[in-house]
Image (cartoon, rainbow, N blue to C red):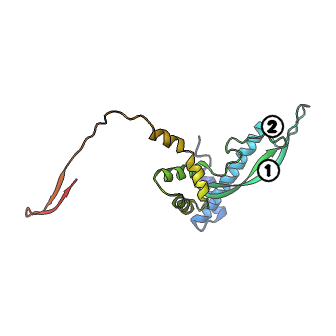
């Protein structure tokens, strides 16, 4: 994937045009750009699904399926909440690939929730962490639903067969700190 698809000149032009005054202004601009890129990706998926571009008309007499507007969806992303328009087709057959049909969270937040859950945090604490990190309100129920996805793996790990013996290495050390006059200042056992 090419990560430098925007040139330095384009970034400078954007900065001069937007006249950012805070990091929040930059984040809001990035959220808008993320939404635009996501919508264009969804439109390209719709073009591929229907077999023709947005401005074209089909000439064949086969089954006719056309664009049928779009539906607004609020996505919870690492940048915060972003509102996008997801295209629809008349037959209701369009299944977006970049985001699933009913997906409301992007992968970054779900991964963060799973890692916080794995670290032993409560659903309430995770909810507060996500609010603090991403400025996104989520319910404790959503945290539970996301964390339930890993329960089969946790159960499988808990029920795995154990080895008869596990090697164990135990190391012991005493650390002394000695002054110039050869007096012991501190003694610590590890």
SS at badge 2: helix
125 vs 94, left or right, is left
Q: Name the residue under label 1.
A: 70
Of the pair 81 and 145, the residue shown nearer to us: 145
- Residue 124: quarter of image: bottom right
Q: Mark 2 points at which residue?
A: 50
Q: How crowded is mark 2: few (under 14 residues within 10 Å), some or many (20 or more)?
A: some
The numbered mark, 2 or 1, whose residue comes first in the sequence reads 2
Mark 1 nearby-residue class (10 Å; few <14, some 14–19, many ≥20): few
Residue 91 coordinates in the image, percent (x, y): 84, 40
The number of numbered discs placed on residues in the rendered structure image is: 2
Query: Residue 133, image x and y in percent?
Result: 54, 60
Location of residue 42 by image quarter = top right
Q: Mark 2 to mark 1: distance in Å?
A: 15 Å
Which label belongs to residue 109? Answer: none
Residue 13 at least partly seen: no
User: Which one is nearer the viewer's eye here, 89 or 138?
Assistant: 138
Q: In this view, does 109 lie to the left or right of 61?
A: left
Task: Give how far across and how far down residue 174 sits, in percent.
Answer: 17, 53
Q: Residue at position x 45%, y 41% from top?
A: 158
Q: Position of residue 136 (x, y in %)?
A: 61, 60
Q: Disc 2 vs disc 1: Cβ atoms closer than 8 Å?
A: no
Mark yes or no: residue 149 visible.
yes
Numbered disc 1: secondary structure: strand
Farthest residue to the left: give it: 181
| Vertical order, 88 against 61 (above or below) | below
Q: In which quarter of the image is the N terminus?
A: top right
Query: Which residue is more in the foreground, 153 or 128?
Result: 153
Instruction: Pick out the residue farthest to the right.
Output: 61
- The quadrant where residue 27 appears: bottom right
């Amino acid at each position: 994937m090419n990560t430098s698809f925007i040139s330095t000149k384009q970034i400078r032009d954007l900065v001069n045009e937007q006249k950012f005054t805070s990091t929040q202004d930059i984040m809001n601009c990035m959220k808008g750009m993320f939404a635009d890129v996501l919508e264009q990706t969804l439109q390209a998926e719709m073009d591929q699904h229907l077999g023709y571009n947005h401005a074209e008309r089909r000439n064949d007499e086969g089954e006719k399926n056309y664009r049928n507007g779009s539906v607004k969806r609020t996505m919870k992303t690492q940048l915060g909440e972003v509102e996008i328009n997801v295209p629809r087709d008349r037959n209701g057959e369009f299944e977006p690939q970049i985001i699933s049909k009913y997906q409301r969270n992007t992968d970054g937040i779900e991964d963060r929730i799973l890692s916080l859950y794995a670290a032993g945090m409560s659903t309430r604490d995770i909810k507060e962490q996500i609010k603090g990190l991403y400025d996104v309100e989520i319910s404790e129920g959503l945290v539970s639903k996301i964390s339930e996805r890993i329960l089969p793996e946790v159960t499988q790990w808990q029920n795995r067969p154990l080895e008869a013996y596990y090697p164990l290495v135990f190391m012991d050390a005493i650390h002394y700190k000695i002054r110039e006059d050869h007096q012991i200042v501190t003694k610590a056992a590890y």
